[in-house]
Amino acid sequence: MMRATESLAQDISIKEACEVLGIPRASYYYYQKHKECFFRESTPSIRPLALSDQERQTVLDTLHEERFFDKAPREIYATLLDEGTYLCSVRTMYRILERHDEIRERRNLLTRPLYHKPELLATASNQVWSWDITKFKGPAKWTYFYLYVILDIFSRYVVGWMVAHREQAVLAQRLIAETCQKQAIEPKQLVIHADRGSSMTSKPVAFLLSDLGITKSHSRPYVSNDNPYSESQFKTLKYCPDFPGYFGSIEDARAFCQNFFTWYNTEHHHSGIGLLKPEDVHYGRTDQIIKERSRILKSAFENHPERFKGKLPKPPSLPVAAWINQPKQEISCGEIH
């Protein structure tokens, strides 16, 4: 409008031009005095606190890293801080994700790895072991003791166990090493199976098994049937009549386990191994036991055949094999996913 007034004023007076266009003369004179300010080239304002384009790209690249791809910004923020890195605030991470249409549930973006079904076969003792960790309640709320158990799946014999104050990879490493030594395990003789807990998949345990020439095997995530022997053994332990609701001390927990595993290995007639005792199966003493059982049943049959409907009874037999997801072919040494 001021430019129009200025142009019209060249043909008529300034007063008349201002009256025609409805511009106060004071405004026109102010414009004439300061008009260089009205047409000064403007420069975009820069927010001093905003991230640069390069910094925003660095944040986005970090959010896209494989380890963070399915994590929430708060989790990523905390992880980076623990690693000594600060990129931006949690809110800024959300803004950057929103700008790239990635604000939806990030857990759905991750491509999960494919886990193969473990297939393990044992036809004798010390071919396949299963191990796991369970918690015992301690004397106070939120206090626990941790029971580590290694079980031979063919004989059901508990070859090693330990009660500790915590779950830790180095403790598992020590128990496995001591148990292998006690059982005189040779390289390429044994497969050790476990779930995917932190101790089971830890580097100390993996390095130990590699050094000993032992194949490691892991369950698929959230598939309890991939580790049935350990699950069943823990159920037997926790459902026994003497199992307490909690333990007053770690010494109490160890004393209970000592009594339980002695009974379990040497006195318990296990239904999964022909009502034989795990220790007898593990150390190859079953032939004579089954032979003696057969002799007693034959004698009972001969004395009263009518009680057996004329059919000679036989004792339960020892299964020729035990397996986790019965394999279709022989297992070779190496890691089984």
Image: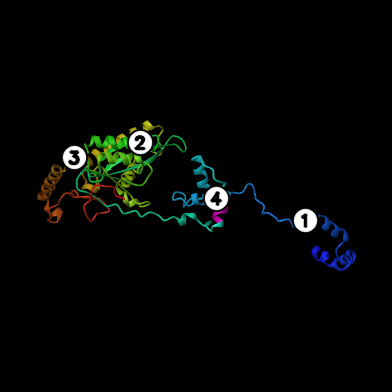
**Which quadrant of the figure contains the N terminus?**
bottom right
Q: CA distance from mark 3 to mark 1?
A: 103 Å
What secondary structure is marked by label 2? helix
Mark 2 nearby-residue class (10 Å; few <14, some 14–19, many ≥20): some
Q: What residue lies at 49% left-to-right and 49% top-to-bottom? A: 62
Q: Which mark is residue 36?
A: 1
Q: Which mark is residue 16?
A: none
Residue linked to disc 4? 54
Amino acid on which disc 2 is placed:
Val
- Which mark is first along the chain, 2 or 4? 4
Q: Position of residue 197 (x, y in %)?
A: 37, 45
Mark 4 nearby-residue class (10 Å; few <14, some 14–19, many ≥20): few
Q: Position of residue 255 (x, y in %)?
A: 33, 32
Residue linked to disc 3? 283
Mark 3 nearby-residue class (10 Å; few <14, some 14–19, many ≥20): few
Q: CA distance from mark 2 to mark 1?
A: 78 Å
Q: CA distance from mark 4 to mark 1?
A: 36 Å
Amino acid on which disc 4 is placed:
Gln
Q: Where does the magenta region start and end? A: 92-98
Q: What residue lies at 16% left-to-right and 43% top-to-bottom? A: 286
Residue linked to disc 2? 170
The stretch drawn in magenta includes residue 77? no
Taking the image as shown, residue 73 lies to the left or right of residue 177, namely right
Taking the image as shown, residue 104 lies to the left or right of residue 44, namely left
What secondary structure is marked by label 1? helix
Which image quadrant for residue 112?
bottom left
